Amino acid sequence: MITDASASTTVDVLADAVARSGVIGRVETPQGTPCVALVLLGNKRLLPFELNRTAAAAWLAEAGIDASTGDDGSGNVVITLRRSAAVHLLIERLLAPCIRSSDIADRLLDAFGLYGLRADVTVADPDTLVIEIRDADSPATAVSLGALLGADDVARGLDFSCETGLDELAGRMRWLLTDVTSGRVGTEARPGGAHARDELEVRLSPDQALRLAERITAGVAL
């Protein structure tokens, strides 16, 4: 059971994990109970269940977490935990994968920054990171990344004045990144127009993103 003496620390630990995970929620201590509650407010793409009491309860049971579910009167799912061990298990099984993916996204962004590569890295879900290159120099940025990874000729013979040029670059980057990260990645080219920039999107797993960050950072060390 969560005692009065441990409640503050338990709340702080859970609140910190929620903040780092990217899951939108708030942590409360229901008045008059020795419990800690997590109110889920959104970002369901990061959750392994639908945002409703039934789905949350089923996932908690399957994960072996001693908790109950309810709502806050506004339709938000509330997970109530009565033991510190359950709080730590919830962090381990629900939030830790999101925290790891978020930390790897930050690490990859830092690696890009070492070479001035302009790209966004976001967590689509705990198993998928997305790299988006969509500035005015989209082909140039992707080409620079290719050269950094040892493919100086990744854009050889491509004409970026037509849509096929960006499509072919996306295909070449897919093969290159698949080799570098030891696993298949997804790439998609989105040609822009008069009011939109070209965009190149790369989808990969957290482990692949970590390998990519390590490869880029190792190049700096050399």
Image: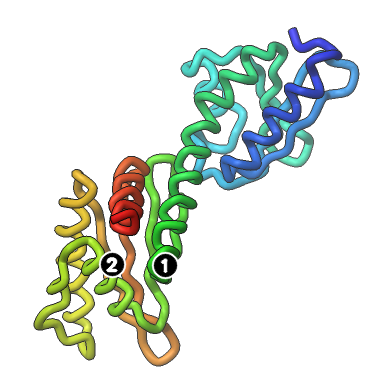
Q: Residue furthest right?
A: 32
Return the residue nearer the eye: 136 or 42. Answer: 136
Which amino acid does the dot numbered 2 rest on?
A: Leu
111 over 26 or under it: above or below: below
Question: Which of the 4 image quarters holds residue 171?
Answer: bottom left
68 over 220 or under it: above or below: above
The residue wearing badge 2 is 145
Number of the label disc, if any, that sits on residue 119: 1
Left or right? Give the position of 180 relative to 115.
Answer: left
Pinpoint residue 175: horizontal percent, then vertical percent.
Answer: 15, 58
Q: Bin the neighbour count of mark 1 within 10 Å (Cα to Cα): few under 14, some 14-19, many 20 and up.
A: many
User: Is there a contact, CB below 8 Å, between mark 1 and mark 2?
Assistant: yes
Number of the label disc, if any, that sits on residue 180: none
Kindly state the secondary structure of the residue where label 2 is placed: helix
Which amino acid does the dot numbered 1 rest on?
A: Ala
Pinpoint residue 115: horizontal percent, then vertical percent.
Answer: 38, 67
Return the residue nearer the eye: 172 or 127. Answer: 172
